[in-house]
């Protein structure tokens, strides 16, 4: 018997409680009819035009993305606007769009941060941010099975996450031993103090800024590792996809988008260990 969109969304809400989302966030159903049947579901980090191409090519009935298409209110979705056009294309293809954002970050056990911690092999993980539910919250902190120098940790991160133009950058002594690791998928720079207070040797996150990294390096309290925002959240996709298939007892087919939605497209002038600055 066909599964309705409403049933699939109920299963997603049960895993990624919308009540966990930040007050400024925009999660839930963007477009779609809860009474329509769903056979195929595609998971992606971003609702880009490329990903919508893939939805149409694969005949998916539902696109689940981590990032919202609309984070700020709009008064219309005209097709001559880039985002409005995506809504038109999805509706015309009979595909729904659903967003699980900060609720998926905070979700206990199967969220963005658990998935990131899991691909790095962290054990005994706990949220960095404490909510009423002790297992839910932003970020995770846990232990590596075997302590490694920071440079080896960065290589481990590079091997565990999707390859991106920006690669993996670290700030700290390359020989510093890393055992306790804090992670935060997406922009987790605001969790530096919390990660240090949790005893982390390194914080892995994305979108870190010059001044905050520089100040941390001066204080020598904790190393940081910066990866592409897309790469830090990608590990959630296979976790959520497999879990949804299981929750729906195999009555739907779920898969992960093959499109790389990291917006960076090229890089030049990189160096493994930069020398003194000069005009190049
Ligand atoms: Zn994000």
Image (cartoon, rainbow, N blue to C red):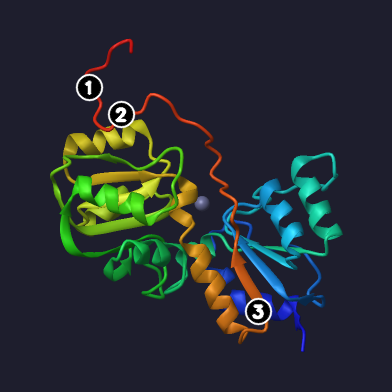
Mark sitting on residue 166:
none
- The residue labelled by disc 1 is 275
Q: Residue at x 24, y 51 (%)?
A: 153
- The front one of 96 and 154 is 154
Give the mark count.
3
Residue 37 percent across, percent down from the top left: 79, 77
Q: Does residue 220 appear in this view? A: yes
SS category of the residue bearing label 1: loop
Furthest toward the top, the residue is 279
Q: Would you say the residues marked 1 and 2 are in contact, meaning their CB atoms lie under 8 Å apart?
A: yes
Q: Does the residue labelled 3 lie within 8 Å of ligand 1?
A: no
Identify the residue position indicated by label 3 in the image. 10
Q: Name the quarter where the C terminus is drawn.
A: top left
Query: Mark 2 highlights which residue?
Result: 271
Count residues near mark 3 (Cα–Cα under 10 Å), then give few for <14, some for 14-19, many for 20+. few
Residue 269's place in the image compared with 189, above or below, is: above
> In the image, residue 262 lies at what x, y percent?
53, 44
Query: In this rendering, which labeled residue sits more in front, label 3 or label 2?
Result: 2
Q: Residue at x 46, y 38 (%)?
A: 165
SS at mark 3? helix
Question: Foreground residue, 141 or 267?
Answer: 267
The numbered mark, 3 or 1, whose residue comes first in the sequence reads 3
| Residue that sits furthest to the bottom in the current view | 1
Q: How far apart are marks 3 and 1 (CA)?
A: 54 Å
Q: Quadrant of the N terminus?
A: bottom right
Q: Is residue 90 above or below residue 76?
A: below
Residue occupying image coordinates x 24% and y 30%? 273
Q: Distance between the residues labelled 1 and 2?
A: 9 Å
């Amino acid at each position: 018997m066909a599964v309705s969109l409403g049933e699939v969304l109920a299963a997603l809400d049960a895993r990624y409680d919308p009540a966990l989302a930040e007050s400024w966030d925009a999660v839930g159903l963007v477009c779609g009819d809860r009474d329509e049947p769903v056979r195929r579901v595609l998971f992606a980090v971003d609702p880009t035009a490329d990903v919508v191409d893939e939805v149409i090519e694969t005949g998916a009935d539902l696109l689940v993305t981590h990032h919202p298409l609309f984070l700020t209110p709009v008064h219309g979705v005209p097709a001559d606007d880039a985002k409005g056009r995506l809504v038109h294309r999805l509706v015309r293809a009979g595909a729904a769009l659903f967003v699980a954002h900060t609720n998926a970050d905070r979700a206990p056990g199967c969220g963005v941060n658990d998935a990131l911690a899991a691909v790095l092999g962290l054990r005994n993980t706990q949220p960095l941010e404490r909510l009423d539910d002790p297992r839910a919250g932003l970020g995770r902190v846990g232990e590596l099975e075997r302590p490694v120098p920071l440079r080896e940790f960065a290589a481990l991160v590079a091997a565990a996450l999707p390859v991106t133009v920006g690669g993996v950058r670290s700030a700290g002594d390359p020989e510093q031993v890393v055992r306790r690791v804090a992670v935060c998928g997406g922009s987790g720079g605001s969790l530096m103090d919390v990660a240090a207070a949790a005893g982390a040797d390194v914080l892995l996150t994305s979108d870190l800024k010059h001044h905050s990294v520089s100040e941390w390096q001066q204080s020598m309290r904790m190393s940081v590792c910066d990866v592409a925002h897309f790469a830090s959240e990608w590990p959630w996709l296979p976790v959520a996809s497999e879990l949804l298939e299981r929750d729906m007892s195999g009555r739907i087919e779920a898969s992960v988008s093959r499109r790389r939605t990291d917006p960076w497209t090229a890089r030049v002038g990189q160096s493994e260990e930069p020398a003194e600055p000069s005009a190049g």
